[in-house]
Amino acid sequence: MKKNWFYLFLLMVVTVIPLTSCDKDDEPVIDNGEEEYQKPGPDYQEETRPVTAYDGLSWLQSNLVEVDDNNNVIRRVYGKPLDPSQPTVVSVPVNDFADADLTFLRWVAPGKEATKVDGGYEYNLTDRDGNPQGAVSFRAVEGEAGVIARMDIAPGTDLKQVTEVMFIDAELWPENAAYQRVEKRKIYWMEDYELTWSEGGPYVLDLHVEKKSLPFYCLQDNTNGKEGILVWLSPDEDNYYAHPSIKWYNSKARSYLPKAAEAQKVVDRINQNVAYWDTMLSDMKANGYDWYAKPFSLFDDHAAKSKFVLNELDEGLILDYIMVFEMDVHPAELEWVFDTSQQMYRYMQIQIIPPVKK
């Protein structure tokens, strides 16, 4: 009987003794019910790629007139139609031919080239992949009172709400059509779109758009031949309904956002001196508008604090890319981001004001 009790006791001891192994890979993993957070390693890269090419037609369109998806005019940038009977013939004030020449070349996208010809330029428009989009020609004008130069649009060029651009002597420009003068570091209230979202059902967000007067900050004045550059930023509210993941912009809101032509001008200005951006944030906060990116927290670790969605789409065979304005790093840059990104992106509005004329 004692022997039986001994064997029973020995069996119990063997059962509770943990099994060990000389193989380190067989060590048990203790599961405490919590998923361990893994920080991205040094080789981690976000699903992004740099912007290396621009769309010539889109760049030209953005410099002349912004239109909505129904081809309605949102805002004219350069020039205005002076003859109500010809609303697509746009006139632009210039001081002389050199001024007209400089203005036209501003409308040529980076990486594209306008071919110099006698009296002006020929500009064959191409998209980001080099596919043809039509053409425009720029020529000096002689013998036509008040007209210094003209830009003609070739048939088949899908430039919206513009069929001709006339460069007019600024001395003959109507006073009530003059460009607004803007000064650096001042705030201007301008109409633009404010976007918010609400829950529209399971896994669905509804977009709400309001065109209203917003406080724009002037990064660059429009004197001495410079373009005025004004910016408004959506505040970092750590709120999915204020700035959600990028797919909701892509499906519903892109048409209300700036194009690459406007954003690149902001990038170029900031990269002249990053203090321009910091000064803007400081000036706006002093005036009651907090545009600073909030510190990261456990509750908003998917927030893209200083990345702003733009109205540029690059459609792929499987995934689409959306262009964003990137201020999380310096120098500032434009980049493409997968539309499947789960980060919460902010948005911005940009208004470009042409140089004031003498």
Image (cartoon, rainbow, N blue to C red):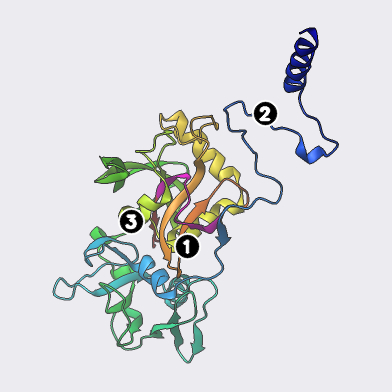
Q: Earlier in the sequence, mark 2 or mark 1?
A: 2
Quarter occupied by residue 172: bottom left
The image shows residue 18 at horizontal and vertical percentages of 76, 25
The residue at which mark 3 appears reads as 251
**Residue 333 within the magenta-colored segment of the rendering:** yes
Q: Nearer the viewer, mark 2 or mark 1?
A: 2
Q: Secondary structure at mark 3?
A: helix
Tell me which residue sits at (32%, 44%) in the image.
203
Q: Amino acid at mark 3?
A: Ser
**Relative to residue 21, is residue 346 drawn left or right?**
left
Q: Earlier in the sequence, mark 3 or mark 1?
A: 1
**Relative to residue 83, is residue 338 drawn left or right?**
right
The image shows residue 187 at horizontal and vertical percentages of 39, 40
Q: Earlier in the sequence, mark 2 or mark 3?
A: 2
Q: Which residues are magenta?
A: 332-348
The image shows residue 255 at horizontal and vertical percentages of 32, 58
Cα–Cα gap, marks 2 and 1: 68 Å
The residue at which mark 2 appears reads as 30
Residue 333 vs 274, above or below: the answer is: below
The residue at which mark 1 appears reads as 225
Q: Main secondary structure of the magenta part?
A: strand
